[in-house]
Amino acid sequence: MVVMTHEGVLEEFHGAKLVGSRSFSFPWYQHVPLSLALSPRIINEVKQFKLDIIHASSPGIMVFGALTIAKMLSVPIVMSYHTHVPV
């Protein structure tokens, strides 16, 4: 399962269930959608999926939603940060 910062995404991509969340823009990052991904719909989707672990990749602000859901559902969480630095 992948929770994304875009609503209206495909339901599945290469076998992975996709769940879109409402997002907003930030003045300094208008091209990057931001989301807390904490709606009851997303919490219910994660709960029904019965995850073994939550992986927050390049978490940004979404990490707060991931941490909250992990704590609510007693699911372990790992985080990784990925970036591209132009050379």
Image (cartoon, rainbow, N blue to C red):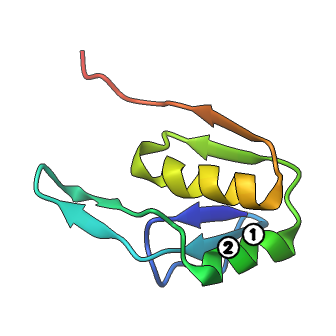
Label 2 crowd (10 A; few <14 / some 14-19 / many >=20)? some
Q: In the rendered structure, which amino acid carries the disc numbered 1? A: Val
Tell me the quadrant of the picture where the N terminus can be found: bottom right
- Residue 52, given in percent of the width and then of the height, sits at 89, 51
Tell me the quadrant of the picture where the C terminus can be found: top left
In front of the other: 8 or 87: 8
What residue lies at 55% left-to-right and 58% top-to-bottom? 65
Residue 16, labelled with which disc? none
Label pair 2/1, CB-CB below 8 angstroms:
yes
What residue lies at 68% left-to-right and 44% top-to-bottom? 55
Residue 46, labelled with which disc? 1
Q: Work out how far the residue at label 2 is from the one at label 1, CA to CA, in angstroms.
A: 5 Å
Query: Horizontal placement of 73 versus 70: left or right?
Result: right
Query: Horizontal placement of 43 versus 87: left or right?
Result: right
In front of the other: 82 or 51: 51
- Residue 50, given in percent of the width and then of the height, sits at 88, 65
Q: In the rendered structure, which amino acid carries the disc numbered 2? A: Ile
Q: Residue furthest front?
A: 72
Pointer 2 residue = 43
What residue lies at 45% left-to-right and 62% top-to-bottom? 36
